[in-house]
Image (spheres, helix red, strand yellow):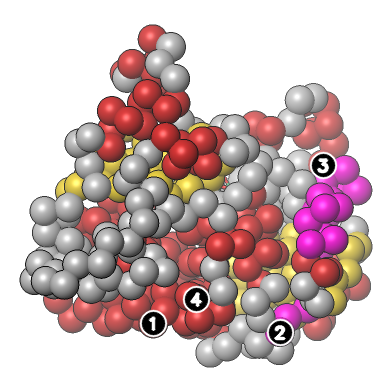
Amino acid sequence: MTTARTTEHLPFGEKRDPRFFGRDILSVSQFDRSDLDTIFAVAHEMRGMVERIGTFDLLKGKVLTNLFYEPSTRTSSSFVAAIERLGGSVIQINNVTYSSVSKGESLPDTIKTLESYSDAIVIRHPEKGSAAEAAAAAAKPVINAGDGPGEHPTQALLDAFTILEEMGTLDGLTVTMLGDLKYGRTVHSLAKLLTLFDVKINYVSPEILKMPAELVAEVGAAGITQLETPDLDAVLPNTDILYVTRIQKERFENVDEYDQVKDSYVITAETMTRAKEQMAVLHPLPRVGEIAREVDDDPRAAYFRQMEYGMYVRMALLALVLGRA
Ligand code: NCD
């Protein structure tokens, strides 16, 4: 991470907001409500620009590195789409067996190498804290695209943006998070981010996959009303946002434990008959059976639109971090 330089004569197109320019994006905790207002306003503008002209040259000449040590479809490709729609380019590193990482190179050395070729680095890594470690080694901005079960801040930002675009506001809503709340990094980041709004949060999960106690304490300390239950029916009728997650099989040490909980909750067309007419169903995807395909045709199913919103949010973040928003 670099700190913002104050330059009197900025190159054409440069607009450096010191809250974002040159900074890392590691955790949602770094943002306040006015930061979010800016990110969402820029994302909304990006949506309009893409709808009108598709691709434009805001980040022409900028190079992004996408460094993925864990599988990714949406996060990786939406960052590629985001930088390319802004006229920049990307160094894509998906398969660590093709890189010197497989030869035993340390994370800081890999980061130092890649930052010498690019203007910012997006990293996904299986270990909690790895994005912060990468940021400590880098002079260029590092964006956390998921550090194991830790955080996934850009996903939470796009989740919140989706809620805003779908419902018009976040304030006053009841958000129900369902599924793997223990290992799901997206719900960890989203719960923290929602403390900036006037919301109620319900956590519905099997007993062994409850939201970590320290996170519930943190969210509670911010004044948010929370309720934990294994019973979806107890909270569904009052839910405005149903945020469904996949059971994170890859994080279980014991496969039998996964088998016990893997089919705990399945949202079907019948479930939807018991939900509010104005509810939105979100899911970070991929799904592996927790939402039946018959739900896709329900207008409340927002999870495919959510992916598209994700590209606009990542365009906004790249433009802000690279000083051109
Ligand atoms: C999520 C992730 O990787 O944490 N996916 C994503 O980024 N859209 C959710 C998941 O893998 O279940």
Query: Label 1 neighbourhood size at 10 Å, few (<14), some (14-19), many (20+)?
Result: some
* Helix, strand or loop status at disc 4: helix
Q: Amino acid at mark 1?
A: Ala
Q: Amino acid at mark 4?
A: Leu
Closer mark to the observer between disc 3 and disc 1: 1
**Disc on the earlier residue, 4 or 1:** 4
**Disc on the earlier residue, 3 or 2:** 2
Which residue, given by chain and number where applicable, does mark 2 sit on? 198
Mark 3 vs mark 2, CA separation in Å: 32 Å
Numbered range of the magenta stretch: 198-218
Q: Residue 231: x and y, percent?
A: 90, 63
Query: Label 4 neighbourhood size at 10 Å, few (<14), some (14-19), many (20+)?
Result: some
Mark 3 vs mark 1, CA separation in Å: 40 Å
Closer mark to the observer between disc 3 and disc 4: 4
Q: Amino acid at mark 3?
A: Val
Disc marking residue 36: 4
